[in-house]
Image (spheres, grey):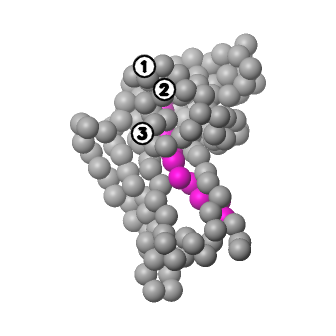
Amino acid sequence: MAQIRLMHAKLHRVKVTEANVNYVGSITIDRDLMEKVGILPLEEVDVINLNNGKRWSTYAIPGEAGKGDICPNGGAALLCQPGDILIIIAYEQRDRAEILLDGHQAKVLVADEHNCCQDFLYQTLTPNQDKLEFQSLSLITDSI
């Protein structure tokens, strides 16, 4: 079966709190943010810097929960600086036929200026006869 790569988790507009060139690679992300969207420790992520257009792939490591830390490490620290706004995306390989049959759901957290959850979205692909329908449902709640 044909495999396709779909976004399953996104941290949108998180702010860089530190850039550590002396750490051995990766990006440190507040553990709570990772858990809310389902990014696993050591999972590969793509990172896009909205301030300068730089894009790179690395792996996520959990930082201290509740601090809001976003810290590109190693060489990636040279691609950004504290205060830059990032998008962090995680993907998963899925069988295309399964998606067409069962659909797909991704979690998106939109951050505020302190890297807290400002909005939370479920983006879904829902099978409808011979096509997939895309829907983005926002859940704004204090419990997220």
- Tell me which amino acid carries mark 2: Asp
Residue in the picture at 61% in, 76% down: 97
Q: Is residue 103 left or right of residue 140?
A: right
Mark 3 residue element:
helix
Q: Is residue 121 left or right of residue 142?
A: right
Mark 3 vs mark 2: which is more N-terminal? 2
Residue in the picture at 59% in, 59% down: 6
- Tell me which amino acid carries mark 3: Lys
Front-most of 83 and 111? Answer: 111
Residue in the picture at 34% in, 58% down: 137
Mark 1 residue element:
loop
Let me know if residue 96 is in the magenta part: no
Mark 1 vs mark 2: which is more N-terminal? 2
Q: Is residue 141 left or right of residue 100?
A: left
- The residue tagged 1 is 67
Residue in the picture at 24% in, 36% down: 142
Front-most of 95 and 24? Answer: 95
Graded by Cα atoms within 10 Å as few (under 14), some (14 to 19) or many (20 or more), the crowding at tag 1 reads: some
Image position of 125 with respect to 118: above or below: below
Magenta region, mostly helix, strand or loop?
strand
- The residue tagged 3 is 36
Please identify the quadrant where the C terminus is shown.
Answer: top left
Front-most of 86 and 25? Answer: 25
Splitting the image into 4 quarters, where does residue 41 fall? top right
Mark 2 residue element:
strand
Q: Is residue 33 left or right of residue 60?
A: left
Marks 2 and 1: in contact by CB < 8 Å? yes
Graded by Cα atoms within 10 Å as few (under 14), some (14 to 19) or many (20 or more), the crowding at tag 2 reads: many
- Tell how many labels: 3
- The residue tagged 2 is 30
Splitting the image into 4 quarters, where does residue 62 fall? top right
